[in-house]
Image (spheres, helix red, strand yellow):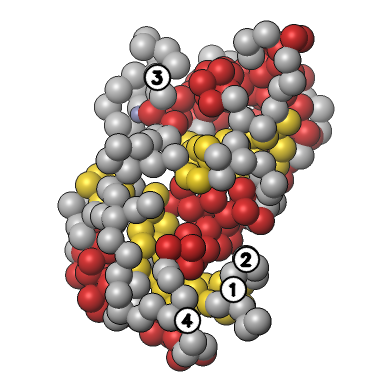
């Protein structure tokens, strides 16, 4: 049987990545443009152009799936998107559907990435899994019985805003001590900057040209790979912050596997090793139970487009054209 084709779009603050994906999860065409800043009309035009470019290469696509950085409700309306202001209060699904005439579904970008990892990547074969992306913020998808957990309104699994410490650092959302304020890739850089200002992390500070404000996560990673003791101590502290969030989620959801995505996956065991150690030290009853493996995600930056396209294919009946799947299963 000829594979069915769907278009997946991953829309974030910096880029619109589009791809044609077949129903085995293979990317067959790809197109990328920078995200226009400003209004929804401008962003919608970029989305429509991306879909048009992809359809010019393969006309036989069945549907469009969109993974969007924001709080997406069950009808594909985005209510809040701190990193993509043009998305705020926009009827994304209905507008794209009307503009391109293909059945369209919209979900949160971390949810679609998690779905891709559960179907074709690091969590493949697991009906219950967590997929956590440590990037600018922390994105998360919770797979329960093979499906993405969406909640009553579509806003479930905003794991980055899981409060770890009410007296902790301020989160971008305005609350204190949220997990992403303590354990995102950005937080690693902030922790290192603070340590350098206290006179620590000399090797990391030198690598950043002597300016504490210039320190980013990769400076810490590089010093850690080189065996610098202060960098390794900071990495251990950061890994603890990552682990305590994972412990809370694992105690609630009992996943079969936890896949970690984001730039630090490229550092291999430098981060994953101490994250596992702290996780096993704190998860409930760790010596009396099977515990989830903590593994690197495998689909990289294409997880979003693959998951979005597959979700759309799953929700679009064979032979459907402009008939739109309303709401969510
Ligand atoms: Zn927050």
Q: Residues within 10 Å of mark 1 (few under 14, many from 20)?
A: many
Q: Residues within 10 Å of mark 4 (few under 14, many from 20)?
A: some
Q: Element under label 2?
A: loop
Location of mark 1 (residue):
22
Residue at the image point whose x is 56% and y is 45% from the top:
146
| Residue 26 seen from this side | yes
Q: CA distance from mark 3 to mark 2?
A: 35 Å
Ligand 1 is found in which quarter of the picture?
Answer: top left
Up the image or down, 166 lies above or below 135; here it is: above
Q: CA distance from mark 1 to mark 4?
A: 9 Å
Up the image or down, 176 lies above or below 184; here it is: above
Of the numbered discs 4 and 2, the one sitting upstream in the chain is 2
Q: CA distance from mark 3 to mark 4?
A: 42 Å
Q: Nearer the viewer, residue 184 or 7?
A: 7
Contact, mark 3 vs mark 2 (Cβ under 8 Å)? no
The numbered mark at residue 163 is: 3
Of the numbered discs 1 and 3, the one sitting upstream in the chain is 1
Contact, mark 2 vs mark 1 (Cβ under 8 Å)? yes
Residue at the image point whose x is 54% and y is 26% from the top:
253
The numbered mark at residue 61 is: 4
Specify whether tag 3 is near ligand 1 (CB below 8 Å).
Answer: yes
Q: CA distance from mark 2 to mark 1?
A: 6 Å
Up the image or down, 93 lies above or below 241; here it is: below
Q: Nearer the viewer, residue 134 or 246?
A: 246
Location of mark 2 (residue):
25
Residue at the image point whose x is 62% and y is 66% from the top:
25
Of the numbered discs 3 and 2, the one sitting upstream in the chain is 2
């Amino acid at each position: 049987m000829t594979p069915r084709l769907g278009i997946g779009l991953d829309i974030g603050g910096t880029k619109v990545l589009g791809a044609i994906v077949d129903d085995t999860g293979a990317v067959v065409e790809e197109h990328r443009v920078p995200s226009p800043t400003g209004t929804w009309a401008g962003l919608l035009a970029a989305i429509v152009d991306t879909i048009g470019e992809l359809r010019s290469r393969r006309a036989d696509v069945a549907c469009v799936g969109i993974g969007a950085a924001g709080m997406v409700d069950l009808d594909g309306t985005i209510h809040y998107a701190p990193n993509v202001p043009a998305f705020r209060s926009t009827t994304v699904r209905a507008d794209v559907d009307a503009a391109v005439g293909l059945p369209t579904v919209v979900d949160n970008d971390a949810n679609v990435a998690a779905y891709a990892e559960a179907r074709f990547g690091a969590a493949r074969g697991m009906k219950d899994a967590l997929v956590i992306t440590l990037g600018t913020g922390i994105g998360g998808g919770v797979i329960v019985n093979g499906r993405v957990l969406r909640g009553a309104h579509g806003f479930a699994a905003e794991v980055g805003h899981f409060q770890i410490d009410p007296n902790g650092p301020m989160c971008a959302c305005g609350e204190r001590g949220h997990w992403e304020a303590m354990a995102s890739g950005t937080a690693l850089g902030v922790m290192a900057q603070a340590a350098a200002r206290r006179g620590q992390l000399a090797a990391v500070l030198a690598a950043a040209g002597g300016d504490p404000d210039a320190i980013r996560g990769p400076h810490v990673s590089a010093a850690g790979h080189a065996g610098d003791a202060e960098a390794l101590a900071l990495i251990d502290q950061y890994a603890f912050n990552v682990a305590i969030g994972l412990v809370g989620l694992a105690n609630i959801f009992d996943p079969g596997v936890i896949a970690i995505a984001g730039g630090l996956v490229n550092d291999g065991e430098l981060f994953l090793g101490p994250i596992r150690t702290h996780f096993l030290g704190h998860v409930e009853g760790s010596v009396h139970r099977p515990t989830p493996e903590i593994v690197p995600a495998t689909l990289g930056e294409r997880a979003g487009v693959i998951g979005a396209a597959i979700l759309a294919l799953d929700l679009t009946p064979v032979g459907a054209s402009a008939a739109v799947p309303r709401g969510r299963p």
